[in-house]
Amino acid sequence: MFAGIMPSDTAPYRILVRDLVVAASIGAYAHEHHARQRVRVNVTLDATVDPAQPEDSLRRVISYGDIVEGTRALAAGRHFNLAETLAEHIAALSLADPRAIRVTVRVEKLDVFPEAVVGVEIERRRVPA
């Protein structure tokens, strides 16, 4: 136990993936189907720990590495017409672990306009069983 802090097995914690840039085939226009674009992804995932696992064990928490690798695989795996669709797939990936509670996903296309970054942000929650 840390001085003055009572750890809780039920209190949520937040996983952050910030500014992950991946090359994705994304866009509804014909010219966007022929070349990959840089897409920046941010994920904020609220989750709980697995209290059955040791305090300092990776098995106790959701790995941000799994979110990064899963996002890379999604971006490499197929064409997405909409940034919203890619965001939904990343949200589903993030909420697949039963410890996940809520996720916010931001997907930004970096090369569409020279003067602006454009994109979407969604928030999704685990559907109660």
Image (cartoon, rainbow, N blue to C red):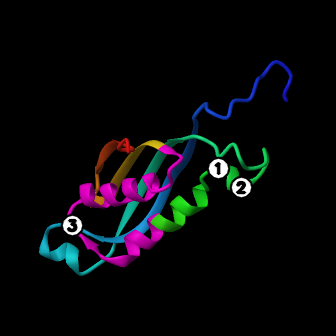
How far is disc 3 from disc 2 in space, using C-alphas? 37 Å
Q: Pointer 3: what residue?
A: 27
Give the camera-side residue of 86 and 2: 2
At numbered mark 1, what does the secondary structure look like: helix, strand or loop?
A: loop
The three-letter code of the residue at mark 2 reads: Leu
Tell me whether circle 2 and circle 1 mark residues in contact (CB < 8 Å): yes
Magenta segment, which residues?
Answer: 71-100
Q: Residue at x 45, y 54 (%)?
A: 94
How far is disc 3 from disc 1 in space, using C-alphas? 34 Å
Q: Residue at x 25, y 55 (%)?
A: 84
How far is disc 2 from disc 1 in space, using C-alphas? 6 Å
Give the camera-side residue of 90 and 112: 90
Within 10 angstroms of label 2, few (less than 14), some, or many (20 or more) residues? Answer: few
At numbered mark 3, what does the secondary structure look like: helix, strand or loop?
A: loop
Q: Pointer 2: what residue?
A: 58
Location of the N terminus by quadrant is top right
Tell me whether circle 3 and circle 1 mark residues in contact (CB < 8 Å): no
Kindly report which numbered mark, 3 or 2, lies closer to the viewer in this rendering.
2
Side (left or right) of 33 relative to 16: left
Residue 27 is a magenta residue: no
At numbered mark 2, what does the secondary structure look like: helix, strand or loop?
A: helix
Residue that extends furthest to the front in the rendered view of this protein: 129
Above or below — where is 97 with respect to 31?
above
> Toward which corner of the image does residue 81 lie, by quadrant?
bottom left
Kindly report which numbered mark, 3 or 1, lies closer to the viewer in this rendering.
1
Q: Pointer 1: what residue?
A: 61
The three-letter code of the residue at mark 1 reads: Val
The three-letter code of the residue at mark 3 reads: Gly
Q: How far from the left and from the top, in percent, is residue 11?
A: 61, 30
